[in-house]
Image (cartoon, helix red, strand yellow):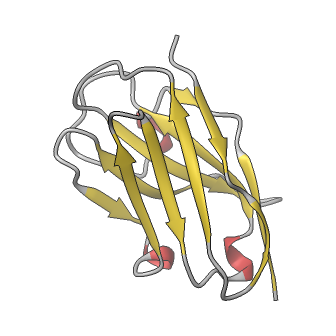
């Protein structure tokens, strides 16, 4: 059973930065997809960023392009989300997830992901 544990969330003022981490117990495939998702109160969960672990290709939702960076440290089995220039609308519970099998096209559709962490809260005040 793959386990994912997020950390790094917190409360910050707008304009500041946070780095989220996601520790993965093991990879099911050498090339799979991992992603960061978020859910604000009263809103649906949305994909924020995704990465294909094999080739390192990435994709971002438009609202975070140029501000967020997804990356991986394979030996440590850790996924990161560097978040800069945070805005109040970035507030939400952030989850990391991994696809179940082979994946080489990063995508932001949560239906493509099978294993999920429990989330870490990010709160951005104005």
**Residue at x 50%, y 21% (from the top left corner):** 25
**Residue at x 22%, y 50% (from the top left corner):** 56
| Res. 107 visible in picture | no
Relative side of 106 to 47, left or right: left
Q: Residue furthest top?
A: 1
> Residue 43, percent across and down?
74, 59
Residue 14, located in which quarter of the rendered image? bottom right
**Residue at x 74%, y 80% (from the top left corner):** 88
Quadrant in which the C terminus is drawn? bottom right
Q: Please, is residue 90 above or below residue 24 in the view? A: below
Q: Residue furthest front?
A: 75
> Residue 65, percent across and down?
41, 77
Q: Please, is residue 96 above or below residue 66 in the view? A: above
Q: Please, is residue 40 above or below residue 22 in the view? A: below
**Residue at x 50%, y 59% (from the top left corner):** 81
> Residue 86, percent across and down?
64, 80
Relative side of 100 to 1, left or right: left
> Residue 37, percent across and down?
56, 51
């Amino acid at each position: 059973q793959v386990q994912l544990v997020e950390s790094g969330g917190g409360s910050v003022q707008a304009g500041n930065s946070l780095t989220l981490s996601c520790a993965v117990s093991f990879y099911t495939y050498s090339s799979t997809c991992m992603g960061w998702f978020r859910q604000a109160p009263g809103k649906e969960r949305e994909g924020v960023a995704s990465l294909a672990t094999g080739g390192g290709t990435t994709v971002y939702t438009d609202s975070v392009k140029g501000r967020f960076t997804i990356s991986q440290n394979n030996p440590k089995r850790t996924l990161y989300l560097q978040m800069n220039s945070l805005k109040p609308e970035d507030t939400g519970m952030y989850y990391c997830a991994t696809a179940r099998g082979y994946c080489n096209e990063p995508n932001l559709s949560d239906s493509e992901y099978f294993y999920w962490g429990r989330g870490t809260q990010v709160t951005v005040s104005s």
